[in-house]
Amino acid sequence: MDSARQIAIQQRHRAGLHCPPHATIACPNCGIFQAVEVEYDGGQGYASLPVTPCSVCHQDLCSFCDQAKCECGQIVCLDCTIIVPDGTPSGLRLCKPCAHQTDPLCPACGEFARMMPRHSSEQQWFECAACGAADAVMRQGAVLKKTGPS
């Protein structure tokens, strides 16, 4: 709550005037104004916006902020999500830590890394984004055999 509004609430309370039961606060992230209850402790009025922190970047998210719930159950802001292809048109929206775990294990370098699709007129393969090794693939990224670097 801004200090001018809080001072106005305190002055009304000291003057014996009716203390407002609600205040309006704007979310610092999305800017949407929301009515919240004002709690009084003696002569001081307090109000806060209920928020949930993003589990990745810890940004406070109000109920109107763009957010998603990952398959792991965590609430994350949309900036901390990645859409992973899962065979459906929309894909699967996961938090960044979970999306990283969906990367396949490269047999050449042993890293979990994105396998970039590559193809020529004769064959199709995936190339490791970490080390550049190329592997022939069959059916959704299952590694079959080593074809050598490209």
Image (cartoon, helix red, strand yellow):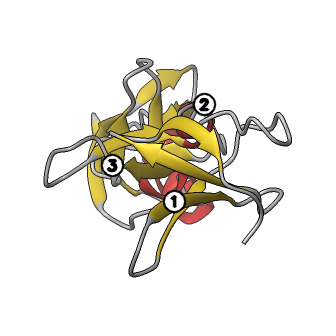
124 up-or-down from 60: above or below: below
Q: Disc 2 marks which residue?
A: 101
Give left or right: position of 91 versus 100. left
Task: Calculate the distance from the C-alpha at mark 1 to the C-alpha at mark 3.
Answer: 17 Å
Instruction: Give the mark nearest the N terminus, 2 or 3.
Output: 3
Which mark is on residue 85? 3
**Label 3 Cα neighbours within 10 Å, binned few <14 / some 14-19 / many ≥20:** few
Task: Calculate the distance from the C-alpha at mark 1 to the C-alpha at mark 2.
Answer: 21 Å
**Label 1 Cα neighbours within 10 Å, binned few <14 / some 14-19 / many ≥20:** many
Asked which secondary structure carries label 3, the reply is loop
Q: Position of residue 111 (x, y in %)?
A: 80, 38
Mark 1 vs mark 3: give the one in front.
1
Q: Position of residue 148 (x, y in %)?
A: 75, 58
Q: Disc 1 marks which residue?
A: 125
Taking the spot 60% from the left edge, 30% from the top edge, the residue there is: 101
Residue situated in front as seen by the camera: 69 or 84? 84
